[in-house]
Image (tube, coloured by chain):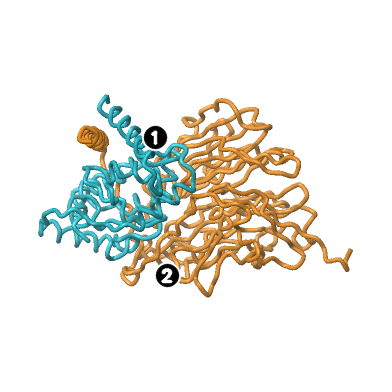
Chain colours: A orange, B cyan
């Protein structure tokens, strides 16, 4: 007994010493977490919501609580995908890949014969996401880019390590990435601001870039983007529309999240000086008279602390006509707000020029306003070939399928 | 290196031996070898786990099993442990009472730590009495040297799998303040 205790102690002490020996670098410059937290909120107990890291089976999901417009139905399409975020599929939709954040996994789902099975295809990564394009699966972690070739029927074998070519900056906060390949065959990759509010430590952050698939030809196409969590291209104009999270600790009213439209490369969306509704930042833009000069304002705001995530322009033929070209946006829901907000999927109907935007609830019931509690957090959207809409729920780790059938009398 | 490997085998042996003694949850016996029978550690560098929030324990154990968090020793111990056992372990230790070791209090250091903690608003997440909640760990009564080391790991991005919010929270707090913070938290009940 004594011997065992001694061995254990030695191991612990040694591990402790080894870790300390590594801690010799210079400390980072301080962008100050509480820079943005005003005295009035000093006693606030608001904190991010914990994620659920254990599996949820389809039968455990309270599906009956979900509300949809008339004629729409919801089912659990795939389950036990802990921490499921953005979805990407191969051409015939027989394979889907889904990344996570803290859990470090990428799942591969087989969708065959009306059934879904899955496996963990990559793991131990720092907040990975994935995007399938032209036969290859690209996995983007905060500090790593991997390409799996010949992935159409499943990503197997050793990936090509593309990390060096993409020159990813080191800060992790707000740097989980939503990645897509555009019609221009370029990879679109965001780099979030590594703080709530700060002067950027370098000019590598708060922007959206695009790269050639091999990592060459990098171009910054949007600046002043605090933390975009999703984008899609408008089906008519081909322009990039993206969500962006507003800053925290300025109270329950905002600044609101944004839905932005990139009309031309190089536009500035305001961070850190100018927020949605032309709010000049009280911390870093103090005394600046023209903080919002040359800043592109959003198509529409998405609500205070709503955590607007994935966006998908609907192009299927299952939903009623009025949904053609409409943007579906998942809002994961607030933490930096005394009354919970979001936890739903909304539609935004707007002109291709972004004018006349109208937001309406679509998929609700994940939040209980009376209890100020939630059970699900819609995160990303994908469209199946039959025109139904998939919605990932990061909290439950499941994917819902939303379908529509016209009421009988109209048939 | 040899010592470290030796320690690992001793741990595995401890796991094996303790599993022979049937107790619910079974794995708790293996935890006890380092973290103490009642979840209060008396080993330097090894944290106390009694009275930690259930969700904190659950998330920590899952991420460690997945190889994205925690020490190598913990990853080996948790390899392949199913969700159900991790849930049981988390419930078990969340329900135990944190009873910190009685160490002498350095009044100056303690008061300095109290001031830094208040200024840095550590209590907004960890609660004003620092007992933690949800995914945010209990600091009150935690081992002093462990707390100090964890803060350094966050400072130098060496806390694998840790919440980036915590790195952000430590921005701007000088490293020389960490010992005072650690002393203060460790002496709270």
Q: Give the image location of residue A336, x and y in percent.
A: 44, 64
Identify the image quadrant of residue B96.
bottom left
Q: Residue at x 72, y 51 (%)?
A: A235
Chain for numbered disc 1:
B
Q: Give the image location of residue A214, x and y in percent.
A: 56, 30
The C terminus of chain B: image quadrant: bottom left
Q: Give me the disc on residue B76.
A: 1
The answer to the question of whether label 2 and label 1 lie on touching residues, with beta carbons closer than 8 A, is no
- Residue B69 falls left or right of residue A353: left
Q: Residues within 10 Å of mark 2 (few under 14, many from 20)?
A: some
Residue closer to the observer: A131 or B180: B180
Chain for numbered disc 2:
A
Q: Give the image location of residue A341, x and y in percent.
A: 52, 67
Do marks 2 and 1 both belong to one polypeptide chain?
no
Callout 1 secondary element:
helix
According to the picture, the residue beneath numbered tag 2 turns out to be: A251
Q: Residue at x 63, y 43 (%)?
A: A88
* Total tally of numbered discs in the picture: 2
Tell which tag, 2 or 1, sits nearer the viewer.
1
- Residue B136 falls left or right of residue A218: left
Q: Is residue A194 visible?
A: no
């Amino acid at each position: 007994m004594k011997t065992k205790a001694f061995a254990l102690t030695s191991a612990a002490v040694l591990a402790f010493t080894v870790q300390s020996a590594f801690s010799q670098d210079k400390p980072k410059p301080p962008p100050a977490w509480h820079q943005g937290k005003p005295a009035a909120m000093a006693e606030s107990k608001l904190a991010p919501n914990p994620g659920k890291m254990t599996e949820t089976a389809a039968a455990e999901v309270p599906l009956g609580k979900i509300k949809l417009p008339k004629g729409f139905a919801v089912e659990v399409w795939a389950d036990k995908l802990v921490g499921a975020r953005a979805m990407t599929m191969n051409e015939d939709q027989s394979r889907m890949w889904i990344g996570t954040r803290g859990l470090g996994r990428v799942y591969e789902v087989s969708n065959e014969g009306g059934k879904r099975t899955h496996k963990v295809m990559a793991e131990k990564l720092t907040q990975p996401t994935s995007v399938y394009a032209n036969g290859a699966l690209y996995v983007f972690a905060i500090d790593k880019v991997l390409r799996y070739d010949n992935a159409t029927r499943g990503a197997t074998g050793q990936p090509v390590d593309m990390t060096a070519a993409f020159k990813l900056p080191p800060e992790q906060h707000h740097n989980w990435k939503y990645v897509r390949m555009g019609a221009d065959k370029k990879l679109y990759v965001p780099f979030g601001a590594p703080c709530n509010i700060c002067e950027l430590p370098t000019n590598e952050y708060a922007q959206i870039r695009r790269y050639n698939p091999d990592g060459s030809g990098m171009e910054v196409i949007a600046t002043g983007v605090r933390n975009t969590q999703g984008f899609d291209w408008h089906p008519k104009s081909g322009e990039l529309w993206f969500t962006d999270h507003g800053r925290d600790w300025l109270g329950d009213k905002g600044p609101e999240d944004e839905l932005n439209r990139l009309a031309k490369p190089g536009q500035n969306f305001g961070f850190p000086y100018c927020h949605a509704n032309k709010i000049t930042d009280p911390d870093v833009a103090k005394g600046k008279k023209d903080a919002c000069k040359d800043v592109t304002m959003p198509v529409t705001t998405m609500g205070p602390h709503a955590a607007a995530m994935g966006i998908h322009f609907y192009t299927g033929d299952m939903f009623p006509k009025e949904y053609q070209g409409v943007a579906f946006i998942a809002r994961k829901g607030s933490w930096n707000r005394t009354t919970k907000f979001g936890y739903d999927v909304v539609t935004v109907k707007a002109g291709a020029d972004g004018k006349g935007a109208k937001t309406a609830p679509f998929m609700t019931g994940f939040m209980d306003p009376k209890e100020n509690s939630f059970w699900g957090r819609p995160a990303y959207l994908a469209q199946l070939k039959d025109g139904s809409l998939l919605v990932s729920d990061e909290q439950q780790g499941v994917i819902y399928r939303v379908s529509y059938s016209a009421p009988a009398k109209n048939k | 290196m040899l010592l470290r490997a030796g320690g690992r085998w001793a741990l595995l042996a401890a796991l094996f031996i303790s599993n022979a003694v049937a107790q619910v949850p079974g794995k708790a016996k293996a935890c006890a070898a380092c973290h103490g029978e009642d979840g209060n550690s008396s080993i330097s560098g090894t944290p106390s786990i009694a009275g930690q929030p259930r969700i904190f324990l659950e998330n920590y154990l899952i991420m460690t099993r997945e190889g994205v968090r925690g020490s190598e020793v913990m990853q080996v111990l948790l390899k392949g442990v199913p969700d159900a056992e991790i849930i049981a372990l988390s419930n078990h230790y969340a329900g135990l009472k944190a009873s910190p070791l009685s160490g002498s209090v350095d009044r100056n250091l303690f008061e300095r730590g109290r001031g830094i903690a208040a200024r840095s608003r550590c209590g907004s997440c960890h609660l004003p009495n620092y007992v933690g909640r949800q995914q945010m760990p209990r600091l009150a009564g935690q081992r002093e040297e462990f707390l100090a080391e964890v803060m350094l790991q966050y400072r130098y991005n060496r806390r694998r799998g840790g919440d980036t919010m915590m790195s952000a929270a430590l921005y701007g707090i000088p490293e020389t303040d960490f010992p005072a913070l650690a002393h203060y938290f460790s002496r709270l009940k």
